[in-house]
């Protein structure tokens, strides 16, 4: 069997352009689907997929590790930057889809079979609505409580919020008080049996991240995410050591070497690689195994499109230290039109059940995708009150 074509197919989904990767083989009807979505870098990733395709056309798609090594190591530049790594990831996911289809088994059976009966999902406040998740003011505690209660009404048992505002490297108490106010309102609204998470988007410095983490430390969060830049390994380690709440990071971390640094420093207790960025399912397996040696949990970053979700779920059925999967369902109303996903989502409790379809168990409707051609993503920029540049 040979790879005959690799296509990047862009689908504009408002906050993001989903980049679907289609790997075509010379076996009639046998194709694989992957995803390489990287918001605000769509054209770069599409170009990177075209560059890498030159290496793979004519190769045997079943030699996944061999092809991964080729994609990562050849053409001199390693695949450890996010654009190339995202392109590699999209192709790698499609190769695993082909492997499952060729053997007639779901992908999780390729990795040793199911280790669990279902995969738990968590949502964003607002379910994927950009405005409700990113633009609800942290001074409006009631709105946070109301959105959390709505997520419970929608069947979820776990949800994530953006309760930490953008802050300068050092600030007074106002932002910290607001973060605590939002978390307190959510806890009050949903009770103690629902799991809450806070995503800092790596907005704070290590010093401010520590203050935010300590301010919400008694509210029993499932995890506290990106309290400072992921590059600041010592900063994360300092925060993790000083709080009871598990610290999470990894959505902007690429490959096993960068994760090893975080694990060795005890910087995180929850590893949030994104399967569409980290190096695909091939590299995710390596990082997850390494995390397990430290008893670190896996909770993949997954606010992307439907192929990313299917890959993240298949992965979850096979990995012992996997605890929960991020999900969005209300980003665009036509999400279900572009993909048929075989994972049944049980509404009451919001968990995914395994399927027995080959590969990832998805079909992409290319006619529907074509209705949503590329558009530049909405700009999201942050400036501090003094005009200096901040983190979104
Ligand atoms: Mg995040």
Image (cartoon, helix red, strand yellow):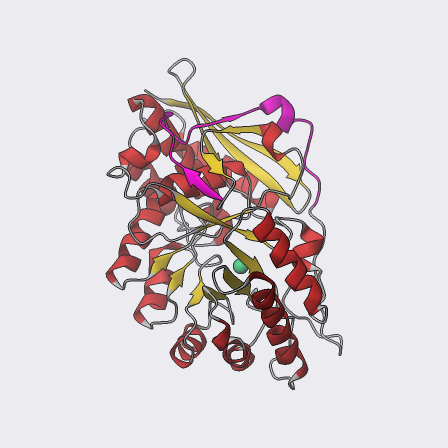
Instruction: Tell me the residue at 30%/59% (across/down).
Output: 291
**Residue 62: percent from left, percent from top:** 30, 28
**Residue 348: percent from left, percent from top:** 50, 43
Query: With respect to residue 287, does 220 lie above or below?
Result: below
The quadrant of the rendering that contains the C terminus is: bottom right
Q: Main secondary structure of the magenta part?
A: loop
Q: Which residues are magenta?
A: 350-376
Number of numbered tags placed on the structure image: 0
The single residue placed furthest to the top in the displayed view is 28
Query: With respect to residue 216, does 8 lie above or below?
Result: above
Query: With respect to residue 188, does 87 lie above or below?
Result: above
Q: Nearer the viewer, residue 131 or 4?
A: 131
Q: Nearer the viewer, residue 262 or 23?
A: 262
The single residue placed furthest to the bottom in the displayed view is 172
Q: Is residue 168 visible?
A: no
338 inside magenta stretch: no
**Residue 172: percent from left, percent from top:** 65, 86
352 inside magenta stretch: yes
Query: With respect to residue 301, does 50 lie above or below?
Result: above
Asked if residue 366 lies left or right of residue 273, the reply is right
**Residue 136: percent from left, percent from top:** 71, 61
Instruction: Tell me the residue at 34%/33% (across/down).
Output: 107
Q: Is residue 336 visible?
A: yes
Instruction: Tell me the residue at 35%/22% (across/down).
Output: 2
């Amino acid at each position: 069997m040979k790879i005959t074509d690799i296509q990047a197919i862009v689908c504009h989904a408002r906050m993001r352009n989903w980049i679907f990767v289609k790997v075509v083989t010379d076996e009639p009807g046998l194709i694989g689907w992957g995803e390489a979505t990287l918001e605000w870098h769509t054209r770069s990733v599409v170009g990177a997929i075209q560059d890498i395709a030159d290496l793979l056309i004519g190769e045997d798609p079943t030699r996944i590790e061999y092809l991964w090594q080729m994609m990562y190591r050849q053409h001199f530049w390693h695949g450890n930057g996010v654009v190339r790594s995202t392109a590699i990831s999209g192709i790698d996911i499609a190769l695993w889809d082909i492997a499952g289809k060729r053997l007639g088994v779901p992908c999780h059976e390729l990795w040793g079979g199911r280790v669990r009966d279902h995969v738990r999902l968590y949502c964003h406040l607002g379910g994927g609505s950009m405005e409700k998740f990113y633009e609800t003011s942290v001074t409006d505690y009631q709105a946070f409580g109301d959105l959390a209660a709505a997520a419970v009404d929608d069947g979820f048992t776990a949800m994530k919020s953006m309760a930490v505002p953008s802050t300068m490297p050092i600030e007074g108490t106002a932002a910290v008080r607001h973060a605590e106010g939002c978390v307190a309102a959510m806890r009050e609204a949903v009770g103690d049996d629902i799991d809450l998470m806070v995503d800092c988007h790596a907005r704070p410095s290590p010093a401010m991240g520590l203050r935010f983490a300590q301010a919400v430390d008694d509210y029993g969060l499932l995890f506290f995410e990106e309290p400072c830049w992921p590059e600041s390994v010592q900063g994360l380690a300092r925060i993790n050591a000083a709080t009871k709440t598990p610290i999470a990071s990894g959505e902007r971390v690429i490959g096993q070497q960068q994760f090893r640094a975080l694990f060795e420093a005890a910087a995180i207790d929850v590893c949030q690689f994104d399967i569409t960025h980290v190096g695909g399912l091939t590299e995710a397996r390596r990082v997850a195994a390494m995390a397990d040696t430290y008893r670190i949990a896996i909770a993949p970053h997954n606010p992307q499109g439907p192929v990313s979700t299917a890959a993240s779920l298949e992965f979850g059925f096979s990995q012992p230290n996997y605890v929960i999967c991020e999900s969005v369902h209300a980003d665009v109303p036509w999400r279900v039109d572009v993909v048929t996903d075989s994972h049944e989502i049980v509404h009451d409790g919001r968990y995914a059940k395994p399927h027995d379809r080959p590969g990832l168990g998805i079909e992409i409707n290319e006619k529907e995708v074509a209705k949503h051609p590329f558009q530049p993503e909405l700009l999201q920029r942050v400036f501090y009150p003094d005009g200096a540049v901040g983190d979104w």
